[in-house]
Amino acid sequence: MSQIQLSFPTTLPPAHVQARLNRFASWLQREAGIRTVWKGNVAYIQGNYSVVKINAAIVLQQGAVAVVAEDPGFLFKGKAEAFLKERFDMYLNPQIPLERLPA
């Protein structure tokens, strides 16, 4: 199966990025029951949302966050990419304080 591969640049320090991604992971768990497991600098996300199976890895890199996810198929790929862009633009925005991000 093909993949979605996205990269989101950030100027935030790695510890701040991980704290923000932890809030995103908490939000995913609360809203959709999607699990996140951290192994080093990689967060593995797995679960189902409606009829879509989610299997992704979020990799913390120097100055960026990379997302590699299974392609959800023709009907959902564009929506998945738009969702990821919207969420990472918000969660990695240094103008938004950590405590104001949904968790």
Image: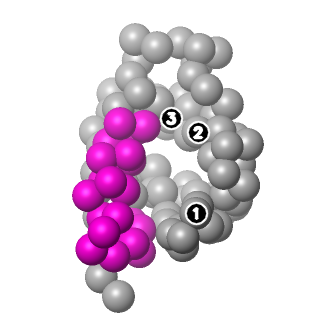
| Residue at position x 63%, y 46% in the image | 28
Viewer-nearest of discs 1 and 2: 1
Per the image, is 48 magenta?
no
Q: CA distance from mark 2 to mark 3?
A: 11 Å
Residue at screen point 70% across, 59% down: 35
Residue 3 appears in view: no
Locate the N terminus by quadrant: bottom left
- Whether residue 81 is visible to the viewer of this picture, yes or no, is yes
Query: Could you tell me how far apart the alpha carbons at marks 3 and 1 are, in whole angstroms?
Result: 28 Å
**In the depicted structure, whether residue 35 falls above or below residue 95:** below
Secondary structure at numbered mark 2: helix
Query: In the rendered structure, are the residues bearing label 1 and label 2 in contact, judged by CB atoms less than 8 Å apart?
Result: no
Q: Which residue is mark 2?
A: 24
Return the x and y of residue 57 as percentages of the image width and height.
49, 64
Query: What amino acid is labelled 2 in the image?
Result: Phe
Find the distance from the CA under tag 1 to the CA under tag 2. Answer: 19 Å
Which region of the structure is painted magenta? Answer: 68-88
Q: Amino acid at mark 3?
A: Val
- Mark on residue 17? 3
From the top left corner, tell me how far across and down residue 43 is, in percent: 58, 58
Q: 13 and 37: which one is in front?
A: 37
Per the image, label 3 sits on a secondary structure element best described as helix
Which amino acid lies under the numbered mark 1 shown in the image of this protein?
Answer: Ser
Label 2 Cα crowd, 10 Å radius (few <14 / some 14-19 / many 20+): many
Residue 39 coordinates in the image, percent (x, y): 65, 63
Q: Is residue 69 magenta?
A: yes
According to the picture, the residue beneath numbered tag 1 turns out to be 50
Q: Nearer the viewer, residue 30 or 21?
A: 30
Callout 3: few (<14), some (14-19), or many (20+) C-alpha neighbours within 10 Å? Answer: many
Can you give x and y, in whole percent of width and height, for residue 47 in the image? 64, 67
Provide the secondary structure element on which disc 1 rests. loop
